[in-house]
Image (spheres, rainbow, N blue to C red):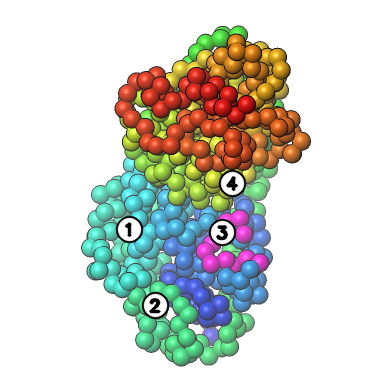
Amino acid sequence: MAVTNRDMANAVRALSMDAVEAAKSGHVGLPLGMADAATVLFRKFLKFDPKDPAWPDRDRFVLSAGHGSMLVYSLLHLTGYASVSRDDIRNFRQLGSNTPGHPENFVTPGVETTTGPLGQGIATAVGMAIAERHLNARFGDDLVDHHTWVIAGDGCLMEGVSQEAITLAGHMKLSKLIVLFDDNAVTIDGSTDLSDSTDQCARFEASGWVSRKVDGHDEKEVTAALKWATKQKKPVFLAVKTIIGFGAPKLAGTGKAHGGPYGAEEIEGIRKSLNWPHAPFEVPEAIEKAWAKTGERGAEDHAAWKKCLAASPKKAEFNAAMTGRMPKNLGKAISKHKKAVVEGGASKATRVWSGEALEVITGLVPEMVGGSADLTGSNNTKTSHTAPMTPKSWGGRYVHYGVREHGMAAAMNGMALHGGIIPYSGTFLVFADYSRAAIRLGALMGTQVIHVMTHDSIGLGEDGPTHQPVEQVASLRAMPGMVVFRPADGVETAECWELALARSDGPSTMALTRQNLAPARKVHEEENLSARGAYVLSPAKGKERGVLIATGSEVEIALKAQADLAAEGIGVRVVSMPSMELFGQQDAAYQAETLGKGLPKVAVEAGVRFGWDRWIGPDGGFVGMDSFGASAPYQKLYQHFGITAERVAAVLKERL
């Protein structure tokens, strides 16, 4: 007999429930409920090739409800991805397997993005869809023309980031974005009636989407809905009505169906309900072959695309964009800019210097797509090369994200994961707390995303403590995989941008000042001195008796303290440390050479001390903040909180 969609879906269900049962851990409710609809998607609509999970023009499939990870693992395995073997299915959630508890893009080829924190998947998918439209405008339909598909649950739609994401997507008319909502009316606590009464279709339509309700267990309805979705001119929301834990005799449709294991009795009941008399992890040969055929479906499209790429006059440009290859003349251009900065001798805020460096860089790197969370004029992230990106002008390179810090950070992760774009965007540093979940996820995944964070200390002044970051730099430095840059002047700012662009395996944060700073570097150096994280900016005058270490706006204060101490016959060196993380990667010899051996050390930074003891020792001096800020002109704030050259000198002398 012919293998039906239900037969194939039941294979997904069986592998999923067997894996969760073997692990005695996991969430099988979603795979059981969404298997029918997901099978239709993979069988008839999704453009993919298991033999090349990184094919640039593949459709992107995002399981936003990442707790249901066995759904995607079963689908990848059955369609022929080498990354998920039957043994990986058997070893679900075990150390070393390619099937971790939540999908991880850096573990399992075929998984497009790490999901788990609810809402992140759908928000990241918005960035993927933006990237597709932008690159389509740049390279044409022959090279870039694909959809982004999302399976999301109630939890994804309850999380606040989803609202930021869907309103941005609706405003931008991302017609290649299609969300399948697993509309099962259940969360862990029980029925969604306990906590929510939102009409999700009305919500999405109010945000500029089109929607449709569909029976998720009816193959014909799902097929018709997906076919309709691919023809729309707006993003599409499909409320796919399902039964969580489909087939479970006691648990189906209940909150307890969300997670497992269900237990031997309930699993046996599911087998009977599905007419699946096979042993655990066993799939009949006919169904295996039907799934294998589904996996082979995209090979023809992939081959045709390869021919288009080979014949395209934009082949070299496309490959350079997708591999992130930097132009050969970028280093020379940045060096020329640094020289002009030194010769100009101007005092400016590092946010302004950042904008001037970007003017040079964005003219040479067309992959850079900028943006801001409604703070363009403050962040200086827009250049003459980055026209606005809109539904009428997808070739633009600047996204007006609106006041959506969290959605912005997630969308940038999606752009970077899609490939062909190096996203950067701006907000105030204190609002990194709003976008922190997405920033953390980018660090976990190793996405090349550059977060421009201006107004980096009490130096922003009158807006007061709600806007003055004191712990944010330290908290971002504490994040594995993140590199924070806090440059002291225009030269260091340019160098830090060069380093962020060279860093393809993780995100960077540019912490930049609102207030003007005097030049710290007054002699042009071809070498990027910031590349090692810290360096001796100003050697001691006379006999060396101590070390002052500073970052950003406080380098100016350290240099003044050095001069004051020299006038008293006390020689100290000044070390600029634009990146604590990069300095931490240097060998012990360079660290000791830079910081000096056996000398008392004082660090100065207009933030909290956390993280500094590694470099100054527990007995080292620190001049900074141990409280929130206040509202006043910044000069008075520095005096009020004692972040002054006089205080730095006094703290150093206390240790002599």
As drawn, 599 above or below 440: above
Count residues near mark 2 (Cα–Cα under 10 Å), then give few for <14, some for 14-19, many for 20+.
many
Q: CA distance from mark 2 to mark 1?
A: 19 Å
Count residues near mark 4 (Cα–Cα under 10 Å), then give few for <14, some for 14-19, many for 20+.
many
Looking at the picture, which amino acid does disc 1 mark?
Met
Secondary structure at numbered mark 3: loop
The residue beneath circle 4 is: 481
| Left or right of residue 641, residue 621 in this image | right
| Left or right of residue 583, residue 623 in this image | left
Prevailing secondary structure class for the magenta stretch in the rendered image: loop
Looking at the picture, which amino acid does disc 2 mark?
Ala
Q: Determine the residue located farthest toward the right in the rendered image.
A: 589
Q: CA distance from mark 3 to mark 4?
A: 15 Å
In magenta segment, residue 427: no
As drawn, 395 above or below 213: above
Q: Are marks 2 and 3 in contact (CB under 8 Å)?
A: no
Residue 146 visible, this angle: no
- Whichever of labels 2 and 3 marks the residue nearer the N terminus, that label is 3
User: Residue 634 sits in which quadrant?
Assistant: top left
Give the magenta range: 96-107
Image quadrant occupied by the C terminus: top right
Name the residue nearer the viewer: 322 or 185: 185
Disc number for residue 158: 1
Q: CA distance from mark 4 to mark 2?
A: 36 Å
Looking at the picture, which amino acid does disc 3 mark?
Glu
The residue beneath circle 2 is: 257
